[in-house]
Amino acid sequence: MDTLLRIAALMALLCLPACERPEPPDAVVATDPARASAIASEPSEPEPDERTRTLGPFLAEHWQLPIAPQGPAPEGWSEAEASLDPALCGGCHPLQYADWSTSLHAAAFSPGFSGQLLEGSLAEPAALRSCQTCHTPLAEQQPVLASGEPSPHYDPALREQGLVCAGCHVRAHQRRGPPRRADATAAPEPVPHGGFEARAEFQQSRFCAPCHQFFDSEGPNGKPVENTFAEWQASPHAARGETCQSCHMPDRRHLWRGIHDPEMVRGGVETALHRLDAEPGHVRAALVLASVGVGHRFPTYVTPQVVLEIWLEDASERRMPGTRRRAVIAREIDFGSFTEISDTRVAPGESVKLELDRPIPPGAARVVARVTVDPDHFYRNMFEGLLPTLDDPEARARISEAHRRASTSTYVLAEHTAPL
């Protein structure tokens, strides 16, 4: 349960207040020494925190989490215009809705997440509210108020749908989004829901930062647990002007593919098996994984694990005992002590190599190398440990389903062979 308490504390870091910094007053020229002394002694305006400095005034206001209740819809609006239901958004935005429906944003209120909110440390009112600020950020998705009292705005069906369209695009019933494309079809007349406010920030990486960066948090070994935005800032991709949206929302698609998607990962890394010079009767080979298209560390978060393996097989494709070499690419943290055990992740533009260097045993016929991706490595182990502690039937059912899903998400990214 110490691990769960630590995770709850980390989730709360995402909910730091995002207050827009006021404009400074006009300069005052003080010719009176007493007046000048009084001005000098006035307390200076506090510096904005890291989150506010990074986001800027508009996004700091836009991403005040949880998002305030929308309030009454403008007079004369239709049910579809006033609704926060993604399916009704899909009536006019069918492609975006279809993409979103397949995404992890739509699954943000997953069995693994929601099951933890039913029993245990994350079910406490404060944690319950803070943990949902990214997974289900709307006030209408929150069952309780900050006081712990039941929320009068709560919509259970909306909560189950995770990060919905309105989470990014709707504030006080005002629609916001990126500027219209030059070749976009004309909006119908009259314009639904009063049109929208076009903002360039929707096309910038910092738009994603509130939920993909733990601000003002040093984290184990000086690195926040969620550090994706900072990793991108330090990457060649950022220097070239490539944003989060460039990879995860190509052509403005609402897909947000990541480590769970084999084709997405294959587009970001290259793997190869190299035979190296060796003396007779000896084998030297290297499996190399290069991060060529990933704009942050690979993998960026603490939950996945990527495994490199290289071994020898006989003519019948049976692995020869004692010949396997193995390496893990991951960031491993002990959340009980909040310390980093290891960090072997690959930075953008860099590579990792696993070598096999040994005498060739009798019967060996080829070298085999494999890269396996385990997107839910941490979660699977966490759910396995959590299940015996649960009494609530619904919590057990949800965590059991989460464990099942985490146990079936592993896939082989690449496999290479070379004859001896």
Image (tube, helix red, strand yellow):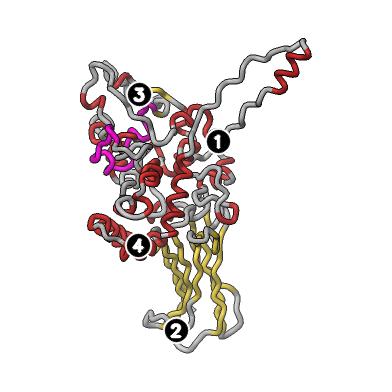
Disc 4 marks a residue whose amino acid type is: Leu
Quarter of the image with the N terminus in it: bottom left
Label ID, residue 386? 4
Q: Residue furthest left?
A: 79
Whether residues under marks 3 and 1 lie with C-beta atoms below 8 angstroms apart, the answer is no
Q: Position of residue 41 (x, y in %)?
A: 71, 23
Q: CA distance from mark 1 to mark 2?
A: 53 Å
Q: Between disc 3 and disc 1, whose residue precedes? A: 1
Q: Nearer the viewer, mark 1 or mark 4?
A: 4
Q: CA distance from mark 2 to mark 3?
A: 64 Å
Q: Between disc 2 and disc 4, whose residue precedes? A: 2
- Asked if residue 181 is among those painted magenta in the image, a careful observer would answer no
Q: Between disc 1 and disc 2, whose residue precedes? A: 1
Q: Position of residue 38 (x, y in %)?
A: 71, 18
Q: CA distance from mark 4 to mark 3?
A: 41 Å
Q: Position of residue 65 (x, y in %)?
A: 42, 36
Label ID, residue 321? 2
- Under tag 4, what secondary structure? helix
Q: CA distance from mark 3 to mark 1?
A: 24 Å
Q: Residue furthest right?
A: 33
- Under tag 2, what secondary structure? loop
Label 1: which residue? 54
Disc 2 marks a residue whose amino acid type is: Pro
- Under tag 3, what secondary structure? strand
Q: Between disc 2 and disc 3, whose residue precedes? A: 3
Which residue range is magenta in the image? 151-176
